Amino acid sequence: MSLTDTYTLSNGITIPIMGFGTWQSEDGDVAYQAVRWALEAGYRHIDTAAIYGNESSVGRAIKDSGVDRKSLFVTTKLWNDAHSYDGARTALTDSLKKLGLDSVDLYLIHWPNPAAIRSQDNQTWKETNAETWRALEDAYKTGKAKAIGVSNFQIHHLEALAETQTIPPMVNQIFLNPSDQQPDLVKYNDEHDILTEAYSPLGTGKLVNLPQVASVAKKFNKSVPQVLIRWSLEKGFLPLPKSTHEDYIKANADVFDFKLNTDDIAQLDRLVGVGGSHIDPDLSDF
Ligand SMILES: NC(=O)c1ccc[n+]([C@@H]2O[C@H](COP(=O)([O-])OP(=O)(O)OC[C@H]3O[C@@H](n4cnc5c(N)ncnc54)[C@H](OP(=O)(O)O)[C@@H]3O)[C@@H](O)[C@H]2O)c1
């Protein structure tokens, strides 16, 4: 395994097995510099979103890096205020403009059931997701998105989407680390040829000093974050670690010279609940 190894999505597109996260990387110098360092460290997969407010900085960093666009994989996501056919089209156009790109490699519906459209009969999200997805399918057909997918979708959201989709989602990006392994959802993704991307692989920082992982880390002369990222890779997930510090960015990519054994993995698997869990998308207040 290496940083430029790839998984192949259900449509045949390849995607680097690890991505670089940018949530809470402040627009401007912080996000710009983080992405520059990530590209220098060898990451070739960048994960952003309209709501992160940093697409312009990400785009500028990509451009200035001189890295060939063809060797890069760029993901962005449609925010909760754009859940309609026209809304999604406009949102993608806007994101592409900010990123300074003609196309993204992956476009995701960020959340399945925004609070603003949640209805009492609990049906509206099904209709708006179907409409929104139709816009993503059209973006895929015209090449503005080389792959399309979803994020934070639970099984019932995926099942509802399947009733009307003509192109299935290729990716489901979800909260995934030893503290919350969402096994039923991962199984569903696997059975439907949907790649599972693991966001918050370090629990948004909550897991980076976990004493329960320290002994495994010491054994390999690695850090706790490196072991957590490796755990994700060995599970066949696609981790998206985020940092704004050059040393962390480099270290998080240095996870390809050791291998966890069955006991190490079992030790991490037992950490359910130690550092947070996913937000229920049907109860979120955004
Ligand atoms: N689809 C979604 O709804 C969704 C939701 C959340 C996240 N995501 C994606 O997944 C990415 C990662 O998730 P996340 O942002 O929640 O956080 P994360 O990657 O789990 O953790 C990031 C935190 O850990 C710290 N950190 C990183 N590497 C470290 C190291 N080697 N040693 C010590 N501390 C370290 C970072 O610090 P510094 O930043 O200060 O360096 C930051 O505070 C996001 O950036 C985003 O791209 C998607």
Image: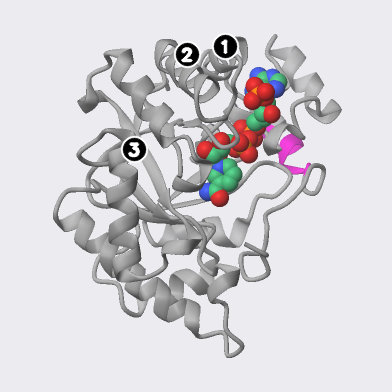
Q: Nearer the viewer, residue 267 or 201?
A: 201
Ligand 1 image position (quadrant)? top right
Q: Is residue 100 left or right of residue 205?
A: left
| Magenta: main secondary structure | helix
Q: At 28% across and 16% down in the image, what residue appears?
A: 67
Q: Which residues are magenta?
A: 265-271
Quadrant the C terminus occupies: bottom right
Q: Is mark 2 within 8 Å of ligand 1?
A: no
Residues packed near mark 2 inside 10 Å, few (<14), some (14 to 19) or many (20 plus) = many
Q: Amino acid at mark 3?
A: Lys
**CA gap, disc 3 and disc 1:** 24 Å
Cα distance between the residues tagged 2 and 1: 6 Å
Do tag 2 and tag 3 residues touch (Cβ < 8 Å)?
Answer: no
Residue 26 horizontal/vertical position (percent) = 57, 30
Q: Mark 1 CB in 8 Å range of ligand 1?
A: no
Dot 3 surroundings within 10 Å: few (below 14), some, or many (20 or more)? Answer: some
Check disc 1 and report the residue beneath it.
246
Q: CA distance from mark 2 to mark 3?
A: 20 Å
Q: Furthest-left residue in view?
A: 142
Which residue is disc 2 drawn over? 37
Circle 3 residue:
98
Q: Identity of the amino acid at label 1? A: Glu
The quadrant in which residue 165 appears is bottom left
The residue carrying pointer 1 sits among few (fewer than 14), some (14 to 19) or many (20 or more) residues within 10 Å by Cα, namely: some
What element does badge 3 sit on? helix
Q: Residue furthest right?
A: 211
Q: Earlier in the sequence, mark 3 or mark 1?
A: 3
Contact, mark 2 vs mark 1 (Cβ under 8 Å): yes
Say whether residue 84 is left or right of residue 203.
left
